[in-house]
Amino acid sequence: HSGAGAGTGGMGGGHGENRDAGRAPRHIEIEVTDDLVDSCNAGDSIIVVGIVRAVNSALASGSVGKKAVETSTYKLYVVAHSINNLTAEDGKNGKRGGFLSWEEEGDENKRSRVSYSSNSASYTSQQLQQIANLAHADHRMYSMPTRMAFPFDLLVRSLCPTIIGNDLVKAGIILCLLGGTPPEVSGLEARSGMTIRSNSHMLVVGDPGMGKSQMLLSANQVATRSVYVGGNTASSTGLTVSMTKEAGGDMGIEAGALVLADRGVCCLDELDKMPKSHQDGLLEAMEQQQVSIAKAGVVASLPSRCSVIAAANPKTGHYNMSKSVAENLNMAGPLLSRFDLVFILRDEADTDRDRMISSSIMENFRNSDRAHVTGGDGEKNSGKLADILDQYGNFERVPLKCRLPWVADFQKQPLPMQQIKEYIAYAREYCRPKMTTDAANVLQDYFMKLRDPQNNDQKKDNVPITTRQLEALIRLSQARAKACLRPYVLREDAEDVVELMIESVKQVHTDESGKIDKTRGGAGGKSKKRRIFLEAMINSGKTSVSSMFFRCGMFSL
């Protein structure tokens, strides 16, 4: 039974910010009739108004007699009179993200409380003004493309501000929270769900202590609808759906984490701790955006249109550059290839970065002003960042690697989390940017460059890229335009996404010597050098009489 009882503070599904501290969610059966049947789905947050009644369990089951009445217990249930669904679906009643009319009041004193009503959220005039101010934020410095990208940079800077650095990872999380533009379909495709997914998936792999779980928790708090799951305690049925036997003997469907996160975000922490048998449940949900079940005579498909943001630790404790990502995580290749962005965080010694992080941590514990986090070192760092941005002209785009650290230093105070949450919810609901010719050419040129490099020397080292990555570029570009509430995807949006994809491909396919190994990404198994060496040993063992190898023979191979 999904939903919330009136006045119970978050019973069943939905967010838990309204629950009493230290109390577990409670369940109660709700009796619905007539038009209230099928008024909500599993995972929806609802408000039920009804009458609480009690029924004798023994008499209800058919037992009679004085003893049955004396030893029986009474069960509480609610007879529903009305249901208010707080998680309305997109496209309901033919409204596909259109702008609704203002509900103006005649009294002058009531105009400040005028709300902006929609199927899924309501915004006051003050909230709409804050959203508009953030969408038009401008630092009035440097080139015009840099000024136009300032709203997106502000969102990245305000996400998990306690984690210093990792700006590209935060940018990927923001893009996953925003999502792409869902395709408008009708007829059989709309009923069957056969559409191209508009949600992006992201995987963060790194050494312990790099702030992966903290960033996932921030994404879980910022998202309007999200589910946070730990891989070490999750099972395949817990992620998808499970079958339960009800009191009357009928079989019921219990929604899992991916189904509860429909039209939202599912954060999977400690993905490496999840057994491979349980990881298989993610394959269909991540690509087809639905979960199919065929058990106990029940054949059904439940929607799971959510973005998956996962974090994992290497199985050996620290990331080994001589192995591929799949080998470091002990993860199946098909699951790894479904992630649009894969970032690898390595704990390497860097004097400037370590000094900045340590100074920030010490200032946080001393409750000092964040504007004086690094003292003299901060002023030197600000000068270096400003000098880097001065190298670009008035009409040139500044790369993300240079722009995001400068914005983090320029904007001393991050935005409130509630404001970010409202902004992202508004962008997901009403902003549906379309691709322009310039942006499409940027994405197509990058795709063709990876598929077929012009340089003959690079053809043997080109990384494997398919149309799945091209679709990922389109989704991320649309999300990048959503961050600024633009109706069209500009060239600068596509260039930012290409920079993110280049960094992701570089981190995944770079070996310990710093060279590109095309067999390390996606469904690729062992790294190229190891596979060639093993094949040479097997061939040599077939031709030689002895099955033993000496050191000199191994060096010759």
Image: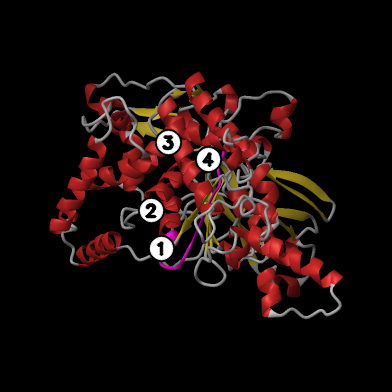
Q: Position of residue 523 (x, y in %)?
A: 68, 52
Q: Mark 2 against mark 4, which lies toward the viewer?
A: 2
Q: Is residue 220 left or right of residue 192?
A: left
Of the two numbered discs 1 and 4 on the same chain, state the one appearing first in sequence.
Answer: 4
Tag 3–tag 2 contact (CB < 8 Å):
no
Earlier in the chain: of badge 4 and badge 3, it is: 4
Q: Nearer the viewer, residue 128 or 340?
A: 340
- The nearer-to-camera label among 1 and 4 is 1
Magenta-drawn segment = 199-212
Q: Nearer the viewer, mark 4 or mark 3?
A: 3
Whether residue 529 is situated above or below residue 457 in the rendered picture: below
Q: At 47% across and 37% down in the image, what residue appears?
A: 497
Q: In the picture shown, does residue 301 fall above or below 524?
A: above
Query: In x, y percent, where is residue 478?
Result: 49, 31
**Front residue of 443 and 155:** 443
What residue did someone put label 1 on?
210
Instruction: Write down the quadrant of residue 143 in the picture.
Output: top left
Where does label 3 land, which residue?
496
Q: Amino acid at mark 3?
A: Asp
The residue shown at (56%, 31%) is 90
Instruction: Give the labeled residue for mark 4.
Output: 87
Seen at 25% across and 63% down, the residue is 355
Mark in the foreground, 3 or 1:
3
